[in-house]
């Protein structure tokens, strides 16, 4: 069983406003991310937000730890609820392939150009926690190295939305 986790606890500093609530195609990025994960996962949660269209959890061990803090919270929940793995993506992860779970299987694996998009076995929980409470960088790539995750390339690459201009450019291309 796979737990889907939308990592949505970022500060949106480059975006200038709450990125999760920004709209693409008439829907918020948060709603789109939840909808993207839903067909692939038995349960979907949002990490790092108090309000969401599905259950939400705070980052672990606290806010401000970056995407790895969100993934750690999801891995801990997955372990408690006896899921096998967590399929994670950022709230701004658009343009993902329809066969993403198959591309990332077997876990652990992540998208090379967007490491927040990954399939992480519950056995990665201890490594994530150790990184977050230890010294050094608290990054998804560091976790990937620690658990021997594969970096998966996708032909088209994935969307990178850091600013309103990035989102506007995607909307423009969608309208062509």
Image: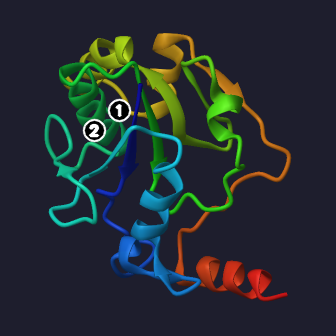
Please say if 17 is above or below 123: below
Q: How is the image coloured?
A: rainbow
Task: State the mark number for residue 97.
Answer: none
Q: Secondary structure at mark 1?
A: loop
Q: Nearer the viewer, residue 35 or 68?
A: 35
Q: Looking at the rendering, in which quadrant would you find the C terminus?
A: bottom right
Please say if 19 is above or below 86: below
Q: Nearer the viewer, mark 2 or mark 1?
A: 2
The residue carrying mark 1 is: 138
Q: Nearer the viewer, residue 17 or 37?
A: 37
Q: Looking at the rendering, in which quadrant would you find the N terminus?
A: top left
Please provide percent x and percent y for residue 117: 54, 42
The residue carrying mark 2 is: 69
- Dot 2 and dot 1 residues touching (CB under 8 Å): yes
Please say if 22 is above or below 59: below
Q: Which residue is at 35% across, 32% downward?
A: 138
Residue 91 in view, yes or no: no
**Callout 1: 10 Å neighbours few (<14), some, many (20+)?**
many
Please provide percent x and percent y for residue 5: 37, 44
Residue 95 in view, yes or no: yes
Q: Which residue is at 52% across, 48% downward?
A: 39
N-terminal-most mark, 2 or 1: 2
């Amino acid at each position: 069983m796979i737990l889907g986790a939308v990592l949505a606890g970022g500060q949106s500093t480059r975006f200038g406003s709450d990125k999760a609530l920004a709209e693409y195609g008439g829907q918020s990025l948060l709603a789109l991310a939840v909808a993207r994960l839903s067909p692939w996962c038995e349960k979907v949660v949002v990490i790092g937000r108090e309000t969401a269209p599905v259950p939400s959890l705070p980052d672990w061990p606290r806010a401000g730890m970056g995407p790895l803090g969100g993934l750690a919270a999801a891995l801990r929940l997955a372990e408690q609820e006896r899921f096998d793995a967590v399929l994670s993506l950022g709230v701004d992860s658009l343009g993902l392939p329809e066969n993403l779970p198959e591309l990332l299987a077997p876990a652990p694996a992540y998208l090379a150009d967007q490491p927040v998009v990954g399939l992480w076995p519950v056995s990665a929980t201890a490594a994530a926690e150790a990184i977050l409470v230890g010294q050094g960088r608290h990054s998804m790539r560091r976790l990937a190295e620690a658990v021997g995750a594969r970096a998966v390339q996708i032909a088209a690459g994935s969307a990178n939305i850091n600013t309103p201009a990035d989102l506007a450019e995607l909307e423009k291309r969608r309208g062509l």
